[in-house]
Image (cartoon, grey):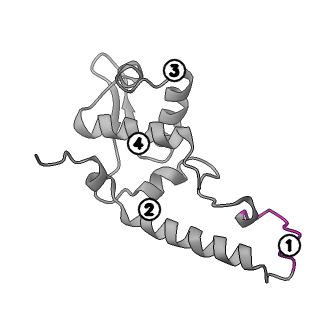
Amino acid sequence: MLIIKEVEYAVMILDELYHESPLSAAALSTRRNIPSPFIYRVLKKLEARDILEIRRGPKGGYSLKADCEKLTLYDVICAFENTFIVTECLKSDYECVHNNDFNCRMHRQFAWIQHLLKEEFQKANLSSLLEEDPE
């Protein structure tokens, strides 16, 4: 499974906002070196999933809306379409010529791996990922 760049950027943005908010898109872009075209796309998707909220005005910007104790990495990944697939044959609309009788060993193995990954991503809440390490 490949975590797409948008998800990586989303975690960077959430890290910044976890420690300081509100922040403007420009500030987030500069702090994490995220290109402008990406930052707005990522922010929009996170806002659409109620992970972030935006406040307009001179003291506005983006802030966390979701509770990071409940929000998981899986939730963040799912904010971006079709990113939680180990292999293309696991897509619901994919017609695999090797799995016509639903007896393909590779399909079953990839499905099991995807199930395990999903469980692990659902276990990891954002707070545990974003907390500062004690020194």
* Residue 106 falls left or right of residue 45: right
Residue drawn at x 31%, y 34% as measured from the top left = 16
Mark toward the start of the polypeptide (1 vs 3):
3
Q: Marks 3 and 4, Cα distance to the nearest angstrom?
A: 16 Å
**Dot 2 amino acid type:** Phe
Three-letter amino acid code at disc 3?
A: Ser
Res 70 seen here: yes
Q: Position of residue 91 (x, y in %)?
A: 72, 62
Crowd class of label 4 (few under 14; some 14 to 19; many from 20; radius 10 Å)? some
Instruction: Answer with mark 3 or mark 2, whichever residue precedes in sequence.
Output: 3
SS class, disc 2: helix
What residue is disc 3 on? 36
| Disc 1: which residue | 98
Disc 3 to disc 2, how far (Cα)? Answer: 28 Å
| Amino acid type assigned to the residue bearing label 4 in the image | Val
Return the residue at label 2: 121
Q: Nearer the viewer, mark 1 or mark 3?
A: 1
Q: In the image, which is nearer the foreground, mark 1 or mark 2?
A: 1
Q: Earlier in the sequence, mark 1 or mark 2?
A: 1
**CA–CA distance in space, label 4 to label 1:** 36 Å
Q: Residue at x 37, y 56 (%)?
A: 71
Confirm whether the magenta stretch covers residue 98: yes
Q: Which residues are magenta?
A: 91-100
Can you identify the residue that label 4 sits on? 11
N-term-proximal mark, 4 vs 2: 4
- Secondary structure of residue under mark 3: helix
Q: Please report the residue visible at 51 percent of the width from the left and 35 percent of the height from the top.
A: 42
Q: For the residue labelled by badge 4, is the local secondary structure a helix, a strand or a loop?
A: helix
